[in-house]
Amino acid sequence: MQQKLFSLIKIASTALITSALGLEIWQLYLLFNDASLPPQLVPIFWIASIALIAHLIEGLIAGFIANTCKKNFFIYGVYTFFVGFVGLLELQEIISSSKE
């Protein structure tokens, strides 16, 4: 049951973070062309920005942990950036199982 939930979270998180990145790129495009987002998308933009910052912090933490455990920090960091907290839990499980 937990694996199904994790799979669902990973799929949803990857889709939402990719959408948030697209929204950020669109916002940058609009800024360079002296335009702005439609007013109804501004709250979504701020929520997406907060989610991207949170996922970036999680990715950095995962990369640091993976680096200290002699794992590939880039792969774990990017993976955790897209899937979120589930990536940190999976990294913790990998590290604890390799110590046994």
Image (tube, rainbow, N blue to C red):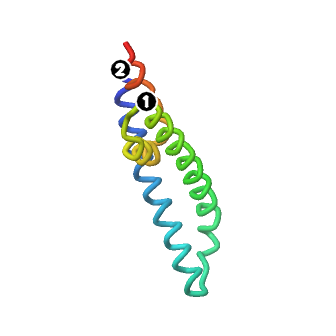
Q: Quadrant of the N terminus?
A: top left
Front-lying residue, 7 or 96: 96
Which residue is depicted at the point 37% across and 12% down?
A: 100
Front-lying residue, 2 or 96: 96
In the rendered image, the vertical position of residue 59 relative to residue 66, given as above or below:
below
Which residue is depicted at the point 47% across and 54% down?
A: 17
Front-lying residue, 25 or 5: 25
Q: CA distance from mark 1 to mark 2?
A: 10 Å
Q: Which mark is residue 8?
A: none
Q: Which residue is mark 1?
A: 69
Which residue is depicted at the point 60% across and 75% down?
A: 38
Q: Residue 94 sits in which quadrant?
A: top left
In the rendered image, the vertical position of residue 31 relative to residue 64, given as above or below:
below
Q: Is residue 45 left or right of residue 15?
A: right
Kindly state the secondary structure of the residue where label 1 is placed.
loop
Front-lying residue, 88 or 95: 95
Question: Residue 53: where, in percent of width, then height?
Answer: 59, 52
Question: Residue 70: where, in percent of width, then height?
Answer: 39, 33
Question: Residue 85: where, in percent of width, then height?
Answer: 50, 37
In the rendered image, the vertical position of residue 3 relative to residue 55, given as above or below:
above
Question: Residue 41: where, in percent of width, then height?
Answer: 59, 68
Q: Which residue is mark 2?
A: 98
Q: Is residue 50 left or right of residue 29?
A: right
Q: Amino acid at mark 1?
A: Cys
